[in-house]
Image (spheres, grey):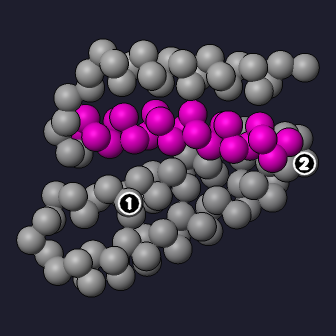
Amino acid sequence: MKTILLLIMSNIFMTTAWYGHLKYKNSPLWKVVIISWLIAFIEYCFQVPANRIGHTQFSAAQLKTIQEIITLVIFTLFSILYLKEDFKWNYMIGFLLIILAAIFIFKK
């Protein structure tokens, strides 16, 4: 559970670093890059321990899969709540297919 919580925190910062600036398109690009980089540093402070701890019980492929599923959930919430974008039916189908792929990754 510790790994999952760290990955969730990591993804919140990652999504903010990568996409948060889209609401500030008038800001100079160099400022956006620096601020995003600083936010990404915080993301790494959660991501690296999550992978280190998680690798004791998950394979690297499983860790990456968990990361991607969490990323999809966090990104979906971020794009709807923060960026005010619509969530379309084809996004849902695509995300469900990715989740289906994850099921195969965890099959023994």
What is the three-letter code of the residue carrying label 1?
Answer: Trp
The location of residue 61, given as percent across then percent down, is 78, 41
Q: On the picture, is 25 further left or further right than 103?
A: left
Does dot 1 land on a helix, a strand or a loop? helix
Residue 88 appears in which quarter of the rendering? top left
Q: Quadrant of the C terminus?
A: top right
The location of residue 94, given as percent across then percent down, is 45, 22
Residue bearing mark 1: 18
How many residues crowd mark 1 within 10 Å: few (<14), some (14–19), many (20+)? some
Does dot 2 land on a helix, a strand or a loop? loop
Residue 36 appears in which quarter of the rendering? bottom left
Residue extent of the magenta highlight: 59-81
Query: Which residue does the image show at 19% across and 36% down from the upper left?
Result: 85
Query: Which residue does the image show at 39% across and 19% down from the upper left?
Result: 92
Query: Which residue does the image show at 62% across and 68% down from the upper left?
Result: 45
The location of residue 90, given as percent across then percent down, is 33, 18
Q: Which label lies toward us, 2 or 1?
A: 1
Residue 56's label in the rendered image is 2
The location of residue 13, given as percent across then percent down, is 45, 59
What is the three-letter code of the residue carrying label 2?
Answer: Thr
Q: Is residue 64 above or below residue 31?
A: above
How many residues crowd mark 2 within 10 Å: few (<14), some (14–19), many (20+)? few
